[in-house]
């Protein structure tokens, strides 16, 4: 059994997965109460499904990119719980969680996360042998610069607010927007991705796991050649879902 925790942004979620069934899953929006709500939510979910935490084989945690404070809350909680239970922590990039929920087709997939100050962190995936794979750098855009950036039919999913959705529809017909339900970052997908890593034995030391933070020269302006520095434990050869 595996517990999944995603506190990357204001959208927070947890799930419990036994390898074949999502036993429990919940998401909520929290602006600045991640620390107080997370522990209560985890405790409540175990009580609701009537399973003891001692049955856990691992804990999955979203690594970001995302909010500095939010990411640290989730990863610190996961590491602390894992130490107590003597189980591994499996880190998964937050973009991969969103991408894994999207139907695979021949168009590229652009995944978005809110990066603060009206910015969007983006990552491009392409279909390869029926799976989404990303070899691209994480880039930071404003809503306006992203409209100009996409020049071919592209699936777009992630944290898209109402104003951005309206602008995308109005100004760029190449942007094929996922529905709000498909844009929800579900922790059940995080659990599935982490379970695959757990079964393969691809589990790094919890001490080596670090959140993925964005660092750009000018946090207010995206330049097409500006690439943020990230701390990402994934293989540089690409992420396969």
Image (spheres, rainbow, N blue to C red):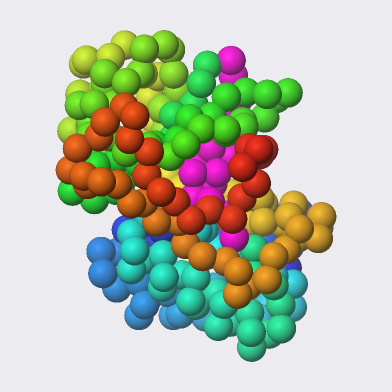
In magenta stretch: residue 147 = no
Task: Say which quarter of the image contains residue 134.
Answer: top right
Q: In this view, does 156 lie to the left or right of 194?
A: left
Residue at (67% x, 30% y) in the render:
131
Residue drawn at 43 percent across, 39 percent down: 138
| Residue lying at 44% horizontally and 18% vertically, measured from the top left | 154
- For the view shown, which residue lies furthest in the bottom direction? 84
In the displayed structure, would residue 224 be above or below residue 75?
Answer: above
Q: What stretch is highlighted in magenta?
A: 91-106
Instruction: Please state the horizontal and vertical placement of residue 57, each as a whole percent of the image.
Output: 74, 72
Relative to 228, is 149 above or below? above
Q: Which residue is drawn at 65% across and 46% down?
A: 235
Can you see residue 2?
Answer: no
| Left or right of residue 136, residue 178 in this image | left
Q: In this view, does 224 lie to the left or right of 186?
A: left
Instruction: Work out whether residue 14 or residue 235 is closer to the camera in this orientation and state it.
Output: 235
The image position of residue 14, as x and y in percent, is 51, 64
Is residue 36 at least partly visible in the picture?
A: yes
Please tell me in which quadrant of the rendered image residue 228 appears. Answer: top left
Where's the C terminus, which quadrant?
Answer: top right
Quadrant location of residue 78? bottom right
- In the rendered structure, the answer to whether residue 23 lies left or right of residue 13 reads right
Q: How many marks?
A: 0
Give the image location of residue 162, x and y in percent: 22, 35
Q: In this view, does 172 lie above or below 218?
A: above
């Amino acid at each position: 059994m595996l517990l999944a925790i995603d506190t990357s942004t204001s959208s927070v979620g947890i799930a419990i997965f036994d390898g074949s069934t999502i036993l429990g899953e919940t998401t909520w929006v929290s602006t600045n109460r991640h620390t107080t709500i997370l522990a209560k939510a985890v405790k409540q979910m175990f009580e609701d499904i009537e399973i003891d935490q001692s049955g856990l084989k691992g804990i999955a945690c979203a690594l970001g990119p995302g909010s500095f404070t939010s990411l640290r809350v989730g990863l610190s909680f996961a590491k602390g719980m894992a130490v107590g239970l003597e189980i591994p922590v499996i880190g998964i990039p937050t973009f991969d969680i969103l991408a894994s929920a999207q139907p695979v087709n021949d168009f590229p997939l652009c995944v978005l996360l809110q990066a603060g100050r009206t910015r969007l962190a983006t990552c491009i995936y392409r279909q390869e042998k029926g799976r989404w794979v990303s070899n691209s750098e994480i880039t930071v855009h404003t809503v306006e610069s992203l409209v100009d950036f996409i020049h071919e039919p592209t699936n777009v999913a992630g944290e898209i607010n109402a104003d951005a959705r309206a602008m995308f529809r109005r100004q760029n017909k190449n942007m094929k927007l996922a529905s709000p339900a498909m844009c929800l970052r579900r922790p059940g997908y995080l659990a599935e991705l982490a379970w695959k890593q757990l079964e393969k034995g691809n589990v790094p030391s919890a001490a080596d796991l670090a959140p993925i933070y964005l660092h750009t020269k000018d946090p207010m302006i995206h330049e097409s050649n500006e690439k943020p520095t990230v701390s990402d434990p994934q293989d540089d050869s690409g992420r396969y879902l």
